[in-house]
Image: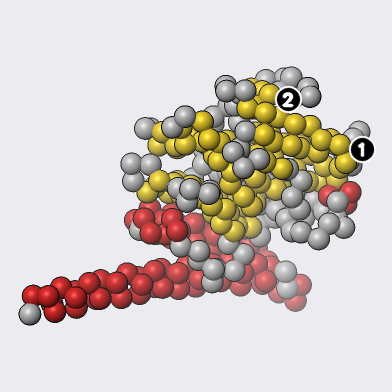
Amino acid sequence: MKKLFLISFLLCCKSGFGQDMKDIENDLVRSFNKIDSFWELTTDTSLSQHYVDYEDSLVVANKKFKLKLLSYTSKYPTTLNYDFSRIKYLFIATSQDHKFRIYSWDTWTGGTEHFFAHLIQFQGEKVESVESKTFGKNTMDDDDPSGLYSEVFQLSIDNRKIYYGYFHSSASTRDAFDGLQLFEIGNQGLNDSLKLFKTEKNLSNILGFDFDFFSVVDRKERPIKLIECSDDGKTIRIPVIDDKEQVTNKWITYRFDGKYFVESKN
């Protein structure tokens, strides 16, 4: 009898967990769909007299979705490995060890200049979800358009948990920026201002470049991948950009020397 009760209990727990995740995703889908709905209304010229109202509603819808996503990904550790595939246009970049991920989405509050919102979820002493204080910060009310994070790479050194996210920004149909941003998970939580990129000018948390999008527009993949990283995260290649901001076939290589990423002269 006890054995039968235990089996029934475990089955109920498993079913309840599955239902919880479906309920969470359904709630997020409904919330995210409101962003799309208000964005479509702002693009309908026949409703131009209500544009300001719809634009305000779009900002509110984004903030509500962000708070829901922040709440769910903070309270439910299993969300760290859930794909949320039914949430259209929510981009999730996850590290190879599945202990770090970045959620990003277009708020549709810009025009040709795209404004993205982000949340960062990670496994430290417990699973946490936060807004980045730097470039990845939710920028709906800021001038910085930020970017879409498409991939997360790991840097394998000692026992440190260091990651860098590959992001893509668009200031206009022509003006684009691609870059990598560093993060580290430590005893104090998330450090999103780690500076390991050593350039001629300074140490930086971000390694990136401006470029003319039309110089690579014919490439098929979206987002276009211009930066290459080795499997161990210790070698990075970025394209040389000429004086007219055209992407060339030449490369600049950065290698981790045990302390910083430095430009390789080889």
User: Looking at the picture, which amino acid does disc 2 mark?
Assistant: Glu
| Number of dots carrying numbers | 2
Q: Nearer the viewer, residue 258 or 103?
A: 258
Inspect this view and state whether residue 164 appears.
Answer: no
Q: Earlier in the sequence, mark 1 or mark 2?
A: 1
Residue 209 horizontal side relative to residue 125, left or right: right
Q: Which residue is at 36% across, 72% downward?
A: 18
Quadrant in the picture for residue 262: top right
Query: Residue 167, how many percent across, how many down?
Result: 66, 46
Residue 52: give x, y in percent of width and height. 65, 63
The percent coordinates of residue 157 (x first, y second) are 51, 31
Using the image as rendered, state which of residue 118 and residue 262 is in the foreground.
Answer: 262
Residue of label 2: 263
Q: Quadrant of the N terminus?
A: bottom left
Residue at image location 80% in from the left, 50% down from the top: 172
Q: Residue at x 73, y 25 (%)?
A: 263
SS label for mark 1: loop
- Image height check: is 217 above or below 48? above
Q: CA distance from mark 1 to mark 2?
A: 23 Å
Q: Amino acid at mark 1?
A: Lys
Quadrant location of the C terminus?
top right
Circle on res. 244: 1
Q: Is residue 3 left or right of residue 139?
A: left
